[in-house]
Amino acid sequence: MAEPVDSEDSPSPPAAAPAARRVRRVSMADVARLAGVSSQTVSRVSNGHPTVVEATRLQVLAAMKELGYRPNSAARALKSGEFRTLGVILFTLSTTGNVRTLEAIASSAAHEGYAVTLLPVAAPTQDEVRGAFTRLGELAVDAFIVIMEVHLLDTATVSLPPGVQVVVADSDAGDRYSVVDTDQAGGTREAVRHLLDLGHRTVWHLAGPEESFAAQRRADAWRATLTEAGRESPPPVRGDWSAESGYRAGLRLADEPGCTAVFTANDQMALGLLHALHEKGRAVPGDISVVGFDDIPEAASFIPPLTTIHQDFAQVGRLLVEGVLRQLRTDAPERGTTLVPTRLVVRSTTAPPRPGS
């Protein structure tokens, strides 16, 4: 079969012409003809539009594959003014919450036909945040999601560039920006009340790092719940979200004679805590009850299986993407905080205290 040339009406080259010839680029119209649909339908499939019937979408994709058609995203962006890309700024990928939130953002964005460009920043400072917005702007993104999980080092509150579509996750910026967060306080209250309802006199707290918004909210709610119940608050023990820090804290808590219950600010630290208590010969839940926070997939496989607070990371990601796309479509900024509910998952690490303890 002869190769297509730049124009269907172009004459054949003379016999002496070089063998190499320019090949006509496959067009959207070519795909439409082969698939038996309109060029507009091909465009909607290329853009990931959710209204295309699945059978039609597969038919168009098969035609694209057969013809070797690749949509020109740069040309589409110049024509429409949309890059169909969301920029995500965050400070670390080392925490379970950030990784699972980012996974949910990417999945929700893909469902809406958007790609995600990730930009971790070197340090939690105002200058780094501003620089990240500038760099992502140069990479051509339509809107921004900022996972602001820690306090900035150089200012009390974050200040984001004016005039940008942005939604913030896990921060204290709810009065100035659109914020989506897990109900940290509600989940903590449920965890502490569960332990008090079992009969424990008080609840110790293995807290997250001081610079973390989530750790601060969980520690504040832990203390407030004990105060409301007329119980004393033991001094909190700090970790850094890692299982290793939970292990070190567990070695200390195992030697506290009045410690019969511990609320741990995340499941990874709870894992280390369980390890230390086992090494110290303290039975869980016989001697000490433990509640975590996150409900990571492995929590049900801990020994014993961990009672914990479930966070709906998928819902957080969906709301972040929906919020920033709503701003794009309406060209209107939003303010306020949306809290995603949590729930207590009771497994085998909590029980009433031993009589007399």
Image (cartoon, rainbow, N blue to C red):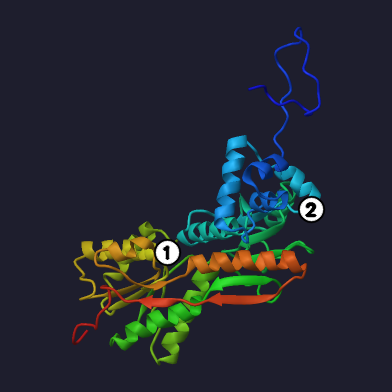
Are the residues flagged by discs 1 and 2 in contact, CB closer than 8 Å? Answer: no
How far is mark 1 from mark 2, CA to CA? Answer: 46 Å
Q: Position of residue 288 (x, y in %)?
A: 26, 75
Q: Secondary structure at mark 1?
A: loop
Q: Quadrant of the C terminus?
A: bottom left
Q: Which residue is mark 2?
A: 81
Who is closer to the viewer here, 134 or 111?
111
Q: Amino acid at mark 2?
A: Gly
- Residue drawn 19% across and 83% down? 354
- Residue drawn 23% across and 71% down? 284
Instruction: Tell which circle, 1 or 2, labels the residue nearer the N-terminal end.
Output: 2
Q: Position of residue 341 (x, y in %)?
A: 49, 77
Q: For label 1, count other residues whose C-alpha is less than 10 Å away and answer few (under 14), some (14-19) or many (20+).
A: many
Q: Quadrant of the N terminus?
A: top right
Task: Count the marks.
Answer: 2
- Residue drawn 20% across and 71% down? 283
**Image quarter for residue 6?**
top right
Q: Which residue is mark 1?
A: 239
Vertical side of 148 occupied by 201: above or below = below
Vertical side of 93 occupied by 3: above or below = above
Q: Amino acid at mark 1?
A: Gly
Vertical side of 273 occupied by 344: above or below = below
Q: Position of residue 134 (x, y in %)?
A: 74, 51
